[in-house]
Image (cartoon, rainbow, N blue to C red):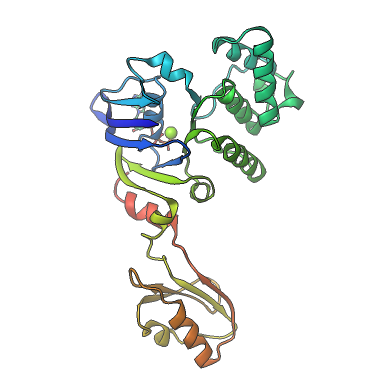
């Protein structure tokens, strides 16, 4: 597993990572969230041995990243922010170079490159120089170098940043496939990605841990948790909905004749709302019970922390 204990990084007067502690177990895909400048990339650089902490420790599968750096790094595949690569190399040349750096030679080297190329579908651009690739393909090259040695831990810094919706979907599927037998830590600003991909999420701001839980647990902190959203063909009786037991309030949505009925914490209000609809004979076209909104939880937690 990955164990982070009291990890701290100061740059001159500025504390980028502030006494951060958490652990990640095998089989987990951890979403690492936080506003710009929260300290996500700095934490990942310390986890992968590219930056020394000011204090605190991090260990990867039992290897301390500072005292057993190489042993720890052998277990890690790392996609740094922006996926920097050597632009004038061809894709094939770059991956062969990385395979050599990772210690593979001869047939093993060829096999490793081939397998990574297949996994991220780079066959069509193998002889192209990296600087002439589109952003999506550059990112795939970054992913290919990260998985080349089949590491047990993947640390991916905003792997889908700047990709088009199709590419985002592809990269997500790829990560999902890789996650089956690895520990994955992925930083992102895309909250749907967390719901789609992650078994757990950690939210930080100003280098400090603010929340740690499953996406469902975090969503349940939302004021929209268990809210019932209605879309009707006619105006609905606001006051009657607001007066139902367990209801915290009623909000109008941008769509005409659409309301969200908010639940008090711990209350399930769907039956009451449904009964009122039946009683009044309202023509309701859509009716949804919300799990909660991660973006709202994120904003509430990190407000004033930037
Ligand atoms: N080498 C450095 N020297 C000085 N300050 C730095 C250095 N690297 C990072 N910082 C500062 O540390 C803080 C955390 O930066 P970091 O890049 O870790 O944030 P982040 O959470 O990855 O943000 P983003 O979402 O924008 O990628 C920022 O205030 C940043 O300016
Ligand atoms: Mg970053």
Q: Residue furthest top?
A: 106
Question: Quarter of the picture for ligand 2?
Answer: top left
Q: In this view, does 52 lie above or below 178?
A: above
Residue 33 location in percent, x, y?
41, 43
**Measuring 68% from the left and 26% from the top, which residue is drawn there?**
133
Residue 162 location in percent, x, y?
57, 38
Q: In which quarter of the image is the C terminus?
A: top left
**Measuring 47% from the left and 22% from the top, which residue is drawn there?**
75
The picture quadrant where one finds residue 21 is top left
**Measuring 61% from the left and 11% from the top, which residue is drawn there?**
97
Q: In which quarter of the image is the N terminus?
A: top left
Observer-nearest residue: 182 or 228?
Answer: 182
Residue 12 location in percent, x, y?
25, 23
Number of marks in the image?
0
The picture quadrant where one finds residue 150 is top right
Does any portion of residue 190 appear in the rendered image? yes
Q: Is residue 181 above or below residue 251?
A: above
Q: In this view, does 192 lie above or below 44?
A: below
Observer-nearest residue: 62 or 40?
Answer: 62
Residue 269 as seen in the image, left or right of residue 210: right
**Measuring 38% from the left and 31% from the top, which residue is drawn there?**
2
The picture quadrant where one finds residue 112 is top right
Residue 275 location in percent, x, y?
48, 86
Does any portion of residue 16 appear in the rendered image? no
Residue 203 as seen in the image, left or right of residue 76: left
């Amino acid at each position: 597993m990955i164990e982070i204990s009291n990890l701290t990084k100061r740059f001159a007067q500025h504390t980028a990572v502030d006494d951060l502690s958490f652990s990640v177990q095998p089989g987990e895909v951890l979403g690492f969230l936080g506003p710009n400048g929260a300290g996500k990339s700095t934490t990942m650089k310390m986890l992968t041995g590219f930056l020394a902490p000011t204090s605190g420790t991090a260990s990867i599968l039992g290897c301390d990243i500072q005292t057993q750096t190489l042993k720890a790094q052998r277990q890690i595949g790392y996609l740094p922010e922006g996926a920097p690569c050597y632009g004038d190399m061809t894709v094939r040349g770059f991956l062969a170079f990385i395979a050599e750096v990772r210690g593979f030679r001869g047939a093993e080297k060829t096999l490793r490159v081939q397998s990574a190329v297949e996994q991220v579908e780079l066959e069509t651009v193998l002889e192209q120089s990296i600087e002439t690739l589109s952003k999506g393909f550059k990112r795939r090259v970054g992913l290919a170098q990260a998985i080349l040695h089949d590491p047990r831990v993947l640390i991916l810094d905003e792997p889908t940043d700047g990709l088009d919706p199709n590419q985002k979907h592809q990269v997500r599927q790829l990560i999902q496939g890789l996650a089956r037998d690895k520990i994955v830590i992925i930083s992102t600003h895309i909250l749907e990605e967390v719901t789609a991909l992650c078994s757990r999420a950690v939210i930080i701001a100003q280098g400090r841990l603010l929340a740690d839980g499953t996406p469902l647990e975090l969503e349940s902190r939302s004021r929209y948790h268990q809210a019932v959203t209605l879309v009707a063909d006619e105006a609905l009786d606001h006051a009657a909905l607001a007066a139902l037991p367990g209801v915290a309030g009623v909000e109008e949505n941008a769509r005409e004749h659409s309301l969200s009925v908010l639940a008090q914490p711990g209350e399930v209000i769907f039956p009451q709302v449904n009964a009122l609809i039946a009683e009044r004979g309202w023509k309701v076209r859509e009716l949804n019970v919300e799990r909660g909104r991660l973006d709202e939880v994120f904003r509430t937690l990190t407000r004033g922390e930037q």
